[in-house]
Image: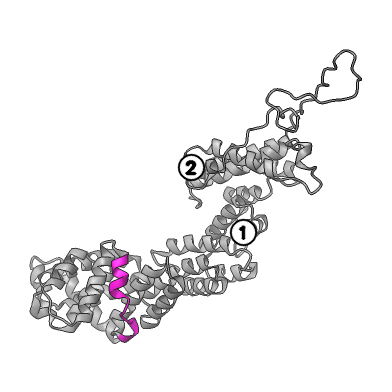
Amino acid sequence: MRRAAVTSRLLGLLLLAGGHPSTGFAQEALQPYQLVRSLQFIQDRIATGDHAALPMQAKLLEMADARLRTADAEDYKDPKNFRALLVYGMSGGNPVTVEAATSRATTDPQSLAIAQGVIDYLTGRPGEAIEALKPIDPMALPPDLGAFLALVKGSLLAGDQPAAALGLLDQARLLSPGTLVEEAALRRSVGIAAGQGDAARFALASTQYVERYLYSPYASQFADSFVTGVIALHMSISQDKLADITSMMDAEREKVIYLRIARRAAIDGLNELSAFASARAERGRDGNTNQDDPRALLYASLSTVTSGTIEDVRAKLGKIDRTRLSQGDRALLDAAQAIAGEVVAPPAALPQEKPAPVAAGQSPAPKIATAPGADHSGLPPVEGAIAEQPAATAAPGGPAANAPDTAAVAATSADAATVMPASAPSPAAGPEPIDPTDAAMTRTRRQLDLIDQMLGAAPK
């Protein structure tokens, strides 16, 4: 409360200064640490959902930058001002300002090491930043600086040392509860826990984020991590736990989250999860159902498009108002209708084997002649079969991204060539004929996946 009252008075001064010709004199009247504390106060309000404070954040960053750039060596002899410089840098400040101010400051070696690590971090040199900050314990620093340092170190180690990163993010939250630092630490913990396969940690961090920071302007990043984590951990997170987390959201956000989960789950073939999420999206709250939302109907249909009720699915797909869908979802609708059409289409007739010619005077005993292009077993190639392509053709992230049809065909061919029933004859007897319906279903499912990669996973 005391900090809020002091900062409110400072903000009043800043607002007056912002509309007065002598703004520079007002900035000079404030110490760097005062400006940076005001910046932190505004950022904390933003984290809890005060979006109206966003313009003030930009103004305070500008004013703090100017004051820190003009501060002299005498100013930085005050440890509070040098800590403010470091916090400013880790709050989205200008690395040029941090480097210039550090070059003329006289302070202790540890503070200089932190400054160098911050500069490396801001200028895209993560390896150097890790080395500079490695020996420094955030818990041994003043809380305002330690919290930011723990957040930065945790972010830097997230890729190579996720367990250590989660520990550092916990320290950041402990040192600075209820702030933008905690918001960022929780948000990043959700993604790291999902990548580690830690369902309990993922659920806990998600619950805490939704409880405290659902209206943060950065909540869309949490939503991305949350949906990705639910898909990755679908075997470990119960539907009840998922419902518990989303029940803390407002009705519109809950619906959008379930729509996104349903879409991703349907494309990934997680039919049970897709059906659950689609039903939750349609159900709505307080008697306000979302059954007329074409997205919910589309995603529910995607999860059952190859089921035994295909005629019902086709009828549902035909009723969807495509004008209410985004461009990406219209492409998914087209693909779903194509897959449904392939399922009910009559299978193409397989070619009949022609009897081998019998030479005059020979016994009419059956014998299969080796046709041109046949394999070593002597069986003729199946008409219409696609030659198996190298596996690299459909490798994720490779040329397939620019050639979806080729990738889908190659992947279908490879799958069809390797998936055999348990009673399949030995290779010497030759390959089983490829069922055209199965091949069409597999190919179109691959096309669905490629479309989603190109168009993005989130509905508009």
Whole-number angstrom distance, CA of label 1 to CA of label 2: 28 Å
Residue density around tag 1, few if under 14, some if 14–19, many if 20 or more, within 10 Å = many
Q: Which kind of residue does numbered mark 2 sit on?
A: Ala
Query: Does the magenta portion include 236?
Result: no
Residue nearest the viewer, comparing 434 with 1? 434
Tag 1: amino acid:
Ala
Q: Position of residue 285 (x, y in %)?
A: 60, 64
Image-based side of 7 in relation to 450, left or right: left
Residue 354 lies, with reference to residue 403, above or below; the image says above
Say which mark, if any, is on residue 210: none
In the foreground, 248 or 448: 448
Q: Nearer the viewer, residue 223 or 97?
A: 97
- SS category of the residue bearing label 2: helix
Instruction: Give the residue at x 78% y 43%.
Output: 426
Task: Give the left or right position of residue 395, taking residue 5 as reference.
Answer: right
Q: Is residue 157 left or right of residue 391?
A: left
Q: Is residue 138 magenta?
A: yes
Query: Is the residue marked by circle 2 packed among few (<14), some (14-19), or many (20+) residues within 10 Å?
Result: some
Q: Position of residue 179 (x, y in %)?
A: 36, 76
In the picture, the disc for residue 401 is 2
Q: Which residue is mark 1?
A: 277
Question: Is residue 450 in sight in this rendering?
Answer: yes
Residue at the image position 26 percent from the left and 66 percent from the top? 120
Which image quarter holds the N terminus? bottom left
Report the side of 431 relative to 226 (left or right): right
Q: Position of residue 255 (x, y in %)?
A: 55, 59
Q: Is residue 79 above or below residue 165?
A: below
What range of the chain is rendered magenta?
127-140
Question: Residue 377: x, y in percent?
Answer: 75, 33
What residue occupies the far front of the structure in this picture? 361
